[in-house]
Amino acid sequence: MSFRARQRLRLAGLPTDKEIGKALCKGPDGQIAGGPVAEGHMYGVTIPVSCPPGYNPVGTWHTHPGGVVEPSPEDWEMTRKLGFRYLCVTVPETGQTQCLDARRHRK
């Protein structure tokens, strides 16, 4: 995922009391867009696999309130189960965001 795409994921005013997330979708021109934002609880969120018309899901983005920017084992498991390439996590308190390529991550 390009640096520019990662920068677009940085959002101001993210909630710090619950996880939020959305699908990452790639358009025919390579542009990345997000699906609808889903709200969860402090330790998880169910992200709908929904993209704008003409876009295909390629990953997910979600927050880790009060946590670390590293994806959890459950995050990796879901990414692989859905067949997605990218997994992005943001810590809302700091804005730190990390996007990783599932093909390069070892089980």
Image (tube, rainbow, N blue to C red):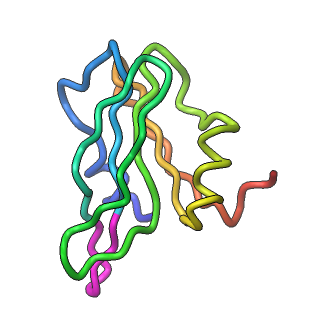
Vertical placement of residue 98 versus 40, above or below:
below
Q: Position of residue 65 (x, y in %)?
A: 42, 19
Vertical placement of residue 2 versus 60, above or below:
below
Q: Position of residue 44 (x, y in %)?
A: 47, 28
Location of residue 11 (image quadrant): top left
For this orientation, the residue located farthest to the bottom is 28
Q: Position of residue 91 (x, y in %)?
A: 42, 26
The residue lying at 65 percent from left, 38 percent from top is 74
Location of residue 83 (image quadrant): bottom right
> Which segment did they paint magenta?
25-32
The residue lying at 37 percent from left, 52 percent from top is 6
The residue lying at 64 percent from left, 34 percent from top is 72
Left or right: 15, with 91 as reference point: left
Foreground pick, 8 / 20: 20
Left or right: 76, with 38 as reference point: right
Vertical placement of residue 43 versus 79, above or below:
above
Vertical placement of residue 34 versus 90, above or below:
below
Instruction: State yes or no: residue 33 in magenta.
Output: no
For this orientation, the residue located farthest to the right is 107
Secondary structure mainly formed by the magenta segment: loop
The residue lying at 22 percent from left, 51 percent from top is 36
Number of callouts in the render? 0
Q: Position of residue 98 (x, y in %)?
A: 49, 43
